[in-house]
Image (cartoon, helix red, strand yellow):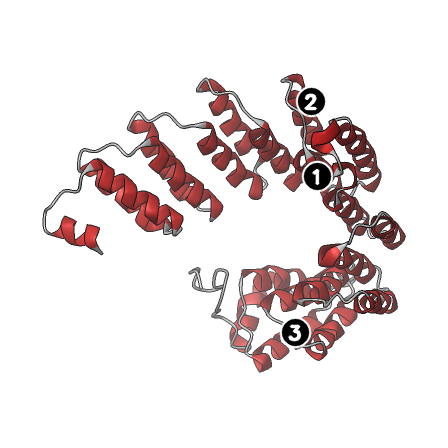
Amino acid sequence: MLMCSMRDAGIQPQMETYNAFIQALCRKDRCKQTLQWLKYMLEAGHVPSAISFQKAIQSFARHGKASLVEEAYEGMSQAGVIPGIETFTALISLEARAGNLKAAERWFARLRDSGLSPNLITYNAVINAAAQKGDAPSAEAWLARLRAEGVEADEATWASLINAYATARDAAGAERAFSRAQAALVGLGGRGAGLSCSPVLYRTVAKAFAKSRDVAGTERWILEMSDRGLEPGLEGYSTILRACGAEGQLQRTEYWFLVMAQRGIIPDKKTVSSVLVGLADGGRAQEAASWLGEMQRRGFPPDADDFAHALRACGRASPPQSTLAQDLLREMKARNVKADQEVLKSLKLAVPSRRVEDLLKDFGLESGGGGRKDVRKGRRR
């Protein structure tokens, strides 16, 4: 790398060169290298541009690197660089994805304190943070603030509000929010044309019924979509399948798989495993264990996520099915599926905590591979 060679040779790049290189690293999402070169630039006596800091923070936020975000923001403040609206929006969005509403609100307050005016995207990020927690009252309060500022809510705003009710398992509240969204979006005239019938809004209300384990309500909203000429898509069908799974209506899932086939829609792995997620929601341990075989039959060998859902079903059963959970661990070992943090979390629901580590050792599942943190070693795989 030319920049490394220059630095090793004692040749100090110009400020413009540093900024261009840092921004190139941001585009490639090389988070740790980006932060390191921000530090190198400061050590060399150059202050990174506001754009370099902004793009770095946005890159870190996209990847959920909260510690890097804090470090970059601190460096930005110490260097006297004033954050822009995009930087604060990225910070709020990072907390929103984690469901940290209070932290998102603190960043919003800092934005205000810096003299900047929040825009629609910024407000939407805070409302989304409330939605992730299922805090509908807070989402409503932020919507009211948005409107008091004279900002018009868009489809994303209303989708987040409806999702707040969905996460709280308040299907009636989601329906009321949908009706308000329809009226508001139609009222926008040309700019909002068509948004009152947005597939996103319909699917989000359907999700509220699915989370409430109301199969009929979920189907009603998906069918209403179809009646209006809107395609539910795999996400919509997955929502129905999850609701059916939660209520143990496996024969009904076959009907919906048939509907998809008739419409030329090929289910992907996420769609097929949504039945398993529903079975876990309902604590239907035996059916969940059987569905792992059904996934294999449909061409989707179960992975760690799927076993985690099946183990969660064991833990949510009444009483917890610890023997079946151990059978699932044996199957994981036979399939060479490595345990990850979600498996560990679900296993703790099904067996006494004191036995978890011993069981993982007994079944040779103590080390992981691919995607999330290893259960035992705490490293990224």
Q: Residue at x 83, y 68 (%)?
A: 262
Can residue 352 be seen in this snapshot?
no
Give the class, few, some or many, for how many residues have Cα within 10 Å of label 3's Cα (few <14, many ≥20).
some
Q: Which one is in front, 159 or 134?
A: 159
The C terminus lies in quadrant: bottom left
In the displayed structure, does residue 304 sit left or right of residue 9?
right
Query: Which quadrant of the rendered structure holds the N terminus?
Result: bottom left
Mark 3: secondary structure: loop
- Across and down, in percent, residue 305 comes to 61, 65
Percent position of residue 355, x then y: 58, 67
Residue 123, percent across and down? Answer: 59, 29
- Residue receiving disc 1: 159
Q: Which residue is mark 2?
A: 144
User: Real-space Cα distance between discs 2 and 1?
Assistant: 15 Å
Q: Which mark sits nearer the N-terminus, 2 or 1?
A: 2
Residue at screen point 75% across, 34% down: 193
Residue nearest the observer in this picture, 33 or 167: 33
- In the image, taking residue 200 as reference, residue 354 lies left or right, namely left
Residue position for label 3: 300
Q: Are marks 1 and 3 in contact (CB under 8 Å)?
A: no
Q: Residue at x 72, y 32 (%)?
A: 192
Q: Amino acid at mark 1?
A: Ala
- Residue 330, quarter of the rendered image: bottom right
Residue placed furthest toward the bottom = 334
